[in-house]
Structures are given as C-alpha cells and as structure tokens.
Image (tube, rainbow, N blue to C red):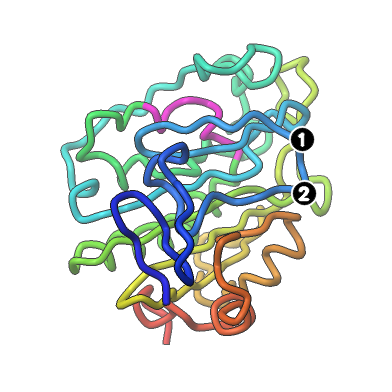
Amino acid sequence: MKIKILGLVAISGLAFSTVSQAENCLLDCPVSTQNGKTITRSIYTLQNNAQTKFADWIAYHITPDTISGPSRSRYWKTDPDLDAANTLEPDDYKDAYATIHTDRGHQVPLASFSNTDDWAMTNYLSNITPQSSNLNQGPWAKLENAVRSFVATGHDVYVVTGPLYENYFATLPATDKEHTIPSGYFKVVAENREDRVYASAFIMYQDAERSYNYCLSEVTVDEVESRSGISFMPLLPSNDNFEVKGSVGGLSSELGCN
C-alpha cells in the first residue's frame, strides 16, 4: 500500500521525507546515472547537465489548481541558479528555427502552471531544449494537452520528462558553447489513486511528423529507464515494479489512447 501523509511517503510502515523535493515527485525524485546539479523550485525539480547544457530530467506535479490560468508571456531567461558556463543563454538560440527548424521547447509546459504565481520559471532556459517544430507543435503538444485534459476532470498527476541522446540531430548555429541537442524525448505520467500507482510512458523523436499520433509512442516505464539511465519512482515497492513499470497502458485511456 502506498499513501502520502503530511509530506511524507509511507511504505510498509517506513516514512521517507520528500520535503527537500517539494511536492514535485511521486515516490521520490528520479535517480540518474548522470551527475548534475539538482534544483528544486515550487513548480518543478530538475537535474541540469553541464555537458549537454540541458536538463537530464524535470519532474512536476500538475493539479486542477495549476492549469487554466490567463495567457502568459513566453520570454526567455538564463537560469539564475546555474553558472553561465553550464547552461544556455537566449542569444544561443538565434536563427535556430530558420536553420535547423527547432522551437524553444518547454519541458515543463507553461500552460500546465499558468495559474500559479511562479509560471515564469518555466521560461528559464534550463527548462528549454531545441525541439523540432513539428514535434513540439504536433504530437508532443497533443500529449501535454491530453495530460491537462485529464487533470481538468479532477485528477492530479506527476510527470517526469527529459531528453534522449541516441544519435546526432543538429547543432545550434549561433553559439560557441559545447552542447548536445537531444535526438528524442521521454515523458512518464503517473497518478497515485486509491493507494495504487498508475503510469504511462512515451518516447518521441525529433523527426516525428506533426500529424503523428502520440498514442503510438507509448512504451513501458522500464524501457524509458533502460534507454535514459534514469530510475523513476525509486521508492516504489519492488513487488509493484512489474505492474507499474513493466506493462503498457496504466493511464492510456485517461490520456486519450484506447
């Protein structure tokens, strides 16, 4: 049985504090094989990678109270909590759309926190990657919309998203900073409902067509862990691992996939 009590996760009679991770992670924040700086904010927790210049993972908790706010501005800012050498600046994205056809893609969607005081933190470049315009505006956006539509029905979900580096995609044309643009992305969506965890995971690639059906990209959480080197929900009891991480379909219907 898995229950949350006053900011603690209780499992089999043992309590583990999650206060240091705010309320952004379900059953503790991810554990990565990469070394990086972890930053916890009111609306997300991320691990920054100084070599790639992008976050290895970003975890966030969406509720009916965080969505459906007013229209917000998309202005870009270097993360104030990172050394300038370890992240990108707004000018580094100059001419990216014209030359490699990428957007400044939010990993934590602005729309998922538009009804919070800290929505502008989603515009920090530690939360941004050069994401193919077709992917960003097509299936990736549709999956994010599906998550919010589910949340709007009265649910709250935990999401972890991040990059995959499995082949070369492109290089930003206007920066001399060493960086690596992701070849694809993962998203793990989980809900703790009636003392049970339900989860669905997705992997999409930078060459995805705008019309691509995101439902076709669903994989097991185990596959995402294997390919990303990241362990999700590390406090999940081992006897729940196969049901939650080893099978497809935990939240498929809730996210618009039959």
In x, y percent, where is residue 15?
A: 45, 57
Residue to which mark 2 is pinned: 165
With 195 as the anchor, is 245 left or right in this view?
right
Say what amino acid the circle numbered 1 marks.
Thr
Q: Secondary structure at mark 1?
A: loop
- Residue 184 higher or lower than 81, as above or below: below
Image quarter for residue 38?
Answer: top right
Say which quadrant the C terminus sits in: bottom left
Magenta stretch containing residue 73, yes or no? no
With 161 as the anchor, is 3 left or right in this view?
left
- Residue found 60% across the figure and 58% down from its top: 186
Proximity of marks 1 and 2: CB atoms separated by less than 8 Å: yes
Image quarter for residue 118?
Answer: top left
Q: Which residues are magenta?
A: 121-130
> What numbered label is drawn on residue 180?
1
In x, y percent, where is residue 120?
A: 33, 27
Say which quadrant the N terminus sits in: bottom left
Magenta stretch containing residue 125, yes or no? yes
Along the viewing direction, whichever of 194 and 46 lies nearer the viewer: 194
In x, y percent, where is residue 183?
A: 73, 50
Q: Secondary structure at mark 2?
A: loop
Say what amino acid the circle numbered 2 marks.
Tyr
- Residue found 40% across the figure and 44% down from its top: 109
Residue furthest to the bottom in view is 258
